[in-house]
Image (tube, rainbow, N blue to C red):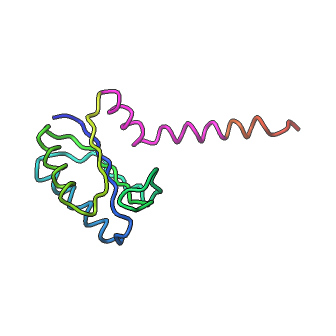
Amino acid sequence: MKNYETVFILNPVLSEDQVKDTVDKFVNVLKKANAEVINLEQWGLRKLAYPIQHKSTGFYIFIEFNADPGVVEILETEFRRDESVMRFLTTVLDKHAVAYNERRRKGEFNKNKDAKKSTRKAEEEPAR
């Protein structure tokens, strides 16, 4: 089994329930194919870099999963069949990307930013 991550963009005219149902459909496709979903993130409604299907925004969904290589083809076929999916991209993760994603899920990067901010504030305050 290999590690994969996929990001897909859903049509912005969908309601929250329709987005949830669509995401559940793709997660079920993965589970039926014996894939293990490691992480699922809904990044929400974001502005697109350029118009896609005359739309300037879309719902971004991120899924990280372990699966056999044939599962990706099944998932991408389902993406192509669903009219609410505007774009998708699936990539294979190497060991460094897997390690990075594990650290990101644990929130290590946010902690470093918070620590740097508190250090800067302490340095900026005048000594009394």
* Residue displayed at 46% across by 57% down: 46
**Residue 44 at x, y percent in the picture:** 42, 59
Report x, y in % for residue 101. Answer: 37, 37
Residue 4: x and y, percent? 25, 39
Give the main secondary structure, helix, strand or loop, of the magenta stretch.
helix
Q: Nearer the viewer, residue 3 or 22?
A: 22
Asked which quadrant contains residue 126, the reply is top right
76 and 93: which one is in front? 76
Relative to 109, is 25 on the left or the right?
A: left
Q: Can you name the residue that lies furthest to the top here? A: 95
Vertically, is 39 above or below 53? above
- Rendering quarter of residue 83: bottom left
Q: Quadrant of residue 15?
A: bottom left
- How many marks can you see? 0
Which range is magenta? 95-117
Location of the C terminus by quadrant is: top right
- Find the residue positioned furthest to the right: 128
The residue located at (27%, 60%) in the rendering is 23
- In the foreground, 73 or 33: 73
Q: Residue at x 29, y 42 (%)?
A: 5
* Quarter of the image that includes the N terminus: top left
